[in-house]
Amino acid sequence: MKKLLAAAAVITALATQVLAADPDPAKWDGVTEEARGQTVYFNAWGGSENINAYIEWAGSRIMEDYGVELVHVKLDDTANAVAKVVAEKAAGRNDAGTVDLIWINGENFASMKRQNLLLAGEWATKLPNWQYVDIENKPTILTDFTIPTDGQESPWGMAKLVFFYDSARTDAGALPQSADGLLEWAKANPGRFSYPQPPDFIGSSFLKQVLSEKVADRSVLLEPVVEGEFDAVTKPLFEYLDQLHPVMWRSGGAYPQNYPAMRQLLADSELDIIFAFNPAEASSAIANGELPDTVRSFTFPGGTLSNTHFVAIPYNAAAKAGALVLANFLISPEAQAHKQDPEVWGDPTVLNVGKLDADDKARFDALDLGIATLAPEDLGPALDEPHPTWMDRLETEWKRRYGVAN
């Protein structure tokens, strides 16, 4: 009997440890109490000065309000953070992991979800600030590249592919209106367009945009890749790129490293059309002195890719409570309005402003979104992101055909 009681005590203790390791956001006071004094290692892309400055600001705010320290682990590829969690799981490090929060979406989220590397349960929907999230009008908040989020990642910002040009030297009346139009424009203006080399996210997104326009049946992209059908489905894309590359910047022999490098080429008058995944990017760059105030935005009337970017907590995070506090702050009206300011970042909000009280609504109403930001009605239709398996397969095939070491 004593042995049974002892065994029961051990089981109870272990269960208590598990519960302690997974704070419940529905019991928010307990989360904030546990979080105080924790350090959150936030693994996020570090290639943009204004985004880095925003994350630093968010860190100062959660330290002030919650006593939580934020350390920005600057990544050049989100997959590196995912690989770190994979390695820790393989080594049996199922707690005290080195990654507490990841800026994530697409194939990286799909990979972590598939391998059970995410904090269990629908924690995101239990965050106090979830009540303001616009799930009614922004379906990509609940579905990440066709994969249900299931409350395992919290939305941080909205994205839509938008093109930019300098109106001081490029005729607005001659701007391309589709991928095919862009190809014809590039042929008429050789050397004046390029895209980052995949697997850079922006470069891979360009491949998906062209494929989405050229594919015979767009619905096939919403399902996982069928290997035996890949060549036939993607043939129009690679025929397109075969024509585009010879008339690109440096004849396709080199590529911009990433979006900031591409933006600099526009500022230096080496490129005439570039693109990003933020409708306010041009206005933000103008506000920060990175582009001239003659730069303007445009999209394709037939639609461009649209998605949501998120933050996720690994299953073995050392500072789960602190990560929950940070994730909740990032969807607060204060943080979302600050982020949407083009002079700060310009990233569109995930909130439904109509749900906010008068003071918080006023934060958004007071924003000047900038001279180069298109009105919502001018952004054009949103094209669904393909299933995550398409990005990986497209990047592999692109490298096989065109791989260039910059």
Image (cartoon, rainbow, N blue to C red):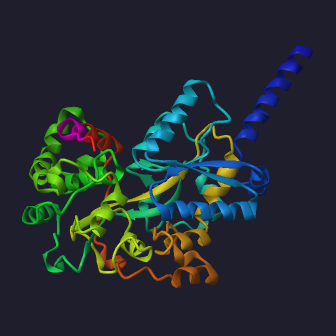
Residue at the location (53% across, 35% down)?
Answer: 84
Front residue of this view, candidates 220 and 324: 324
From the top left corner, tell me how far across and down residue 65 is, in percent: 74, 64
From the top left corner, tell me how far across and down residue 209 is, in percent: 25, 56
Taking the image as shown, residue 96 lies to the left or right of residue 116, namely right
From the top left corner, tell me how far across and down residue 91 is, in percent: 58, 24
Residue 185 included in the magenta stretch of the image = no
Q: Quadrant of the C terminus?
A: top left
Taking the image as shown, residue 119 lies to the left or right of residue 270, namely right
Residue at the location (23% across, 39% down)?
Answer: 403
Q: Tell me, yes or no, if residue 75 can be seen here.
A: yes
From the top left corner, tell me how far across and down residue 14 is, in percent: 77, 29
Taking the image as shown, residue 99 lies to the left or right of residue 115, namely right
Residue 403 included in the magenta stretch of the image = yes
Q: Main secondary structure of the magenta part?
A: helix
Return the residue found at the far right: 2
Please, is residue 10 above or below residue 340 in the view?
above
Q: Tell me, yes or no, if residue 215 can be seen here.
A: no
Image quadrant assignment for residue 226 = top left
Q: Quadrant of the N terminus?
A: top right
Front residue of this view, candidates 163 and 358: 163
Please, is residue 363 above or below residue 345 in the view?
below
Taking the image as shown, residue 28 lies to the left or right of residue 285, namely right
Q: Which residues are magenta?
A: 397-404
Q: How many marks?
A: 0
Image quadrant assignment for residue 182 = bottom left
